[in-house]
Image (spheres, grey):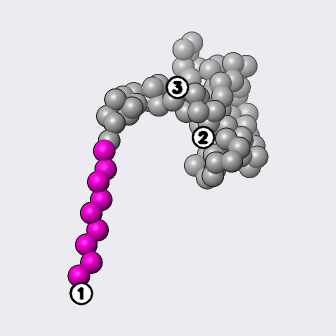
Amino acid sequence: MTLEAVVSLTIDRTAIPRTYRDYLDQLKSMGEMREIDDEVDWNYEEGAILRRCTEQCLPGPIFNKIKDSPDGFRAACFGMAKSGTPGQT
């Protein structure tokens, strides 16, 4: 006896982010990322904030100002384990 399954999948290619910035904007619009405008130390604070966000299932941080980094440099970190949106895993 042979079982066959037919799967039909349609991909909306216009909804796929084209750049990393587009991807981050999409995550922000979903409530999965939050911007932090205060200066953070890349060596201590950035990792501690990321760990806290991951442990508490909070949205991932986007750091807009990092100590000793040139103007305009940003860092985005998000835990891969859980969603920061209530009701989503």
Q: CA distance from mark 2 to mark 3?
A: 13 Å
Q: Which element type, helix, strand or loop, lies under badge 3?
A: helix
Tell me which amino acid carries mark 2. Answer: Phe
**Which residue does the numbered mark 3 point to in the structure image?**
25
Task: Sort mark 2 into few (<14), some (14-19) or many (20+) by Cα contacts within 10 Å.
Answer: many
Task: Place residue 74 in its image quadrant.
Answer: top right
Query: For the residues carrying marks 2 and 3, which lies nearer the camera in this image?
Result: 3
Tell me which amino acid carries mark 3. Answer: Asp
Tell me which amino acid carries mark 1. Answer: Met
**Which residue does the numbered mark 1 point to in the structure image?**
1
The residue under the point 74% across, 49% down is 55
The residue under the point 27% across, 78% down is 3
Ranked by sequence position, the earlier of labels 1 and 2 is: 1
Q: CA distance from mark 1 to mark 2?
A: 47 Å
Query: For the residues carrying marks 3 and 1, which lies nearer the camera in this image?
Result: 1
Q: Nearer the viewer, residue 24 or 48?
A: 24
Which residue ends up furthest to the bottom in the rendered image?
A: 1
Disc 1 and disc 2 in contact, CB within 8 angstroms: no
Left or right: residue 2 versus residue 65 is left
Disc 2 and disc 3 in contact, CB within 8 angstroms: no
**What x and y, as percent, mark residue 14?**
34, 29
| Principal secondary structure, stretch drawn in magenta | loop
Q: Which residues are magenta?
A: 1-10
Q: How many marks?
A: 3
Left or right: residue 34 versus residue 23 is right
**Which residue does the numbered mark 2 point to in the structure image?**
78
